[in-house]
Amino acid sequence: MALWKAEEDESRAAALQMQAMRQVELLESDHGPYWMRRAEGLLARHVSAAPATGDLAILVRAAASFYRAGKLTDALGAYERAWQHAKESGDELQAFDLAKKSAAVLQQLDRLDEASARFRRIATGSPAHAEAPQTHLLAIFNASQALRKSAEPDVAGYAALLSEHIKQWPDSETSQTASWWLARVLM
């Protein structure tokens, strides 16, 4: 990792990134989870200090390491970088998954409005994805939690989100839940 950090040649730096990743994987297989987690922590700190890191697997591993260590702000940044990288490389499935993970971190950081907007954008951006209805329901859940904490709740916006869900995924199991929640709002 020190060589990777010091390397100015991009192709050589990329090779050193891959070598660092292989070393972490070797530690995992040869020495167990404790030493792998220690190596992952070092890798994660290095990735956060090196914004030019472009390897998706390294970004994902770093994000997971930050998350496990309870460093949610760092995990959010790493998940967002990995999400952007997956989108740019055309890996829609992994982009969806990474976007959901970043939204979940926003939720844990109690940034509920942002989490709701992110979950909604993910679901409506890929409405045919198998997890889209459940992801949109997470947007609704976060909106409801933000509504409860708000001094001036936007009940109409919440109801619109519920209606959007029912209209977009009428045959989904989650549509019944959204219908029930909408009925409770309208009572």
Image (cartoon, rainbow, N blue to C red):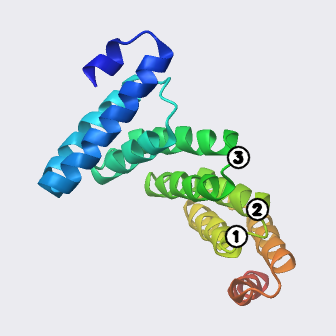
Q: Is residue 97 left or right of residue 153?
A: left
Query: For the residue marked with disc 1, what is the amino acid?
Result: Ala
Nearer to us in this view, 178 or 62: 62
Say which quarter of the image contains residue 5. top left
What's the mark number on residue 126?
2
Do the CB atoms of the residues marked 3 and 2 lie less than 8 Å apart? no
Quarter of the image where the N terminus is located: top left
Task: Give the Cα distance between marks 1 and 2.
Answer: 7 Å
What's the mark number on residue 118?
none
Query: For the residue marked with disc 3, what is the amino acid?
Result: Gly
Query: For the residue marked with disc 2, what is the amino acid?
Result: Ser
The crowding category of the residue bearing disc 1, from other C-alpha atoms within 10 Å (few below 14, some 14 to 19, many at least 20), is many
The crowding category of the residue bearing disc 2, from other C-alpha atoms within 10 Å (few below 14, some 14 to 19, many at least 20), is some
What's the mark number on residue 90?
3
The secondary structure type at the circle numbered 3 is loop
Task: Give the Cα distance between marks 3 and 2.
Answer: 13 Å
Residue 18 in the image: state x and y as whole percent: 39, 34
Quarter of the image where the C terminus is located: bottom right
At x 73%, y 55%, the residue is 121
Q: Earlier in the sequence, mark 1 or mark 2?
A: 2
Residue 105 in the image: state x and y as whole percent: 47, 53
Nearer to us in this view, 47 or 168: 47
The answer, for residue 133, to whether it is visible in the render is yes
The secondary structure type at the circle numbered 1 is helix
The answer, for residue 37, to whether it is visible in the render is no
Q: Earlier in the sequence, mark 3 or mark 2?
A: 3
Q: Is residue 10 left or right of residue 183?
A: left
Residue 39 in the image: state x and y as whole percent: 22, 41
Task: Check disc 1 and report the residue beneath it.
Answer: 132
At x 65%, y 72%, the residue is 131
Say which quarter of the image contains residue 123. bottom right
